[in-house]
Amino acid sequence: MQGRERDGNLLRGSLEFLLLASLEGGALYGLRIIQDVQNKTGGHFSFKEGTLYPALHRLEKRGLIRAEVQPSDVGGPPRKYYHLTDSGVRELHRQRDAQRAHAAALRPFLEFA
């Protein structure tokens, strides 16, 4: 993980959700997943390939995503694109509901700042 160290625990607790949600819009390869998460969170969640690929392999092993090698869109070596499976879509919806419930439970404590 890079960036703010205080985000480490938040990232560990949210990484799977962030990866599944990033793939909701369609297939992406590793670097694009990292960029998507960084862009959508305003840089709040930032991580390196050493965090990404083990997490992607865990998701793939659980059948939540699948990988497909495709030619590079810029003429380089082929890239591995990751897609949500039907199980992955269901898990994303479950995790999204859990994240919403978590945020709602924290809301009263955040408003006293």
Image (tube, helix red, strand yellow):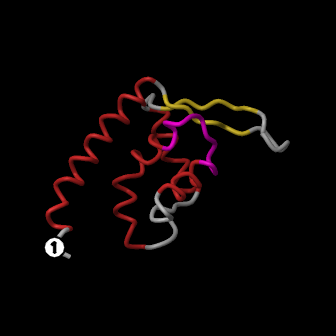
In the shown orientation, is residue 75 left or right of residue 19? right
Residue 74: percent from left, percent from top:
82, 44
| Rendered view: 113 above or below 55 | below
Residue at 39% across / 65% down in the picture? 8
- Residue 51 location (% of width, % of height): 51, 55
Mark 1 residue type:
Phe
Task: Give the residue furthest to the bottom.
Answer: 113
Residue occupying image coordinates x 55% and y 32%? 83
Considering every residue shown, the one lying at the far front of the view is 111
The quadrant in which residue 29 appears is top right
* Number of marks present in the image shown: 1
Dot 1: few (<14), some (14–19), or many (≥20) neighbours within 10 Å?
few
Among all residues in the image, which is located at the extreme top? Answer: 86
Quadrant the C terminus occupies = bottom left
Seen from the viewer's position, the closer of residues 62 and 46 is: 46
Image location of residue 40, percent across then percent down? 49, 55
Q: Is residue 41 magenta?
A: no
The span shown in magenta is 22-32
Mark 1: which secondary structure? loop
Q: Residue at x 37, y 72 (%)?
A: 6
Compared to residue 26, the image places residue 40 above or below, namely below
In-image side of 93 versus 53 (left or right): left
- Farthest residue to the right: give it: 75
Residue where numbered disc 1 is placed: 112
Q: Position of residue 15 (x, y in %)?
A: 42, 51
Residue plotted at (51% across, 53% down):
37
Q: Quadrant of residue 73?
A: top right
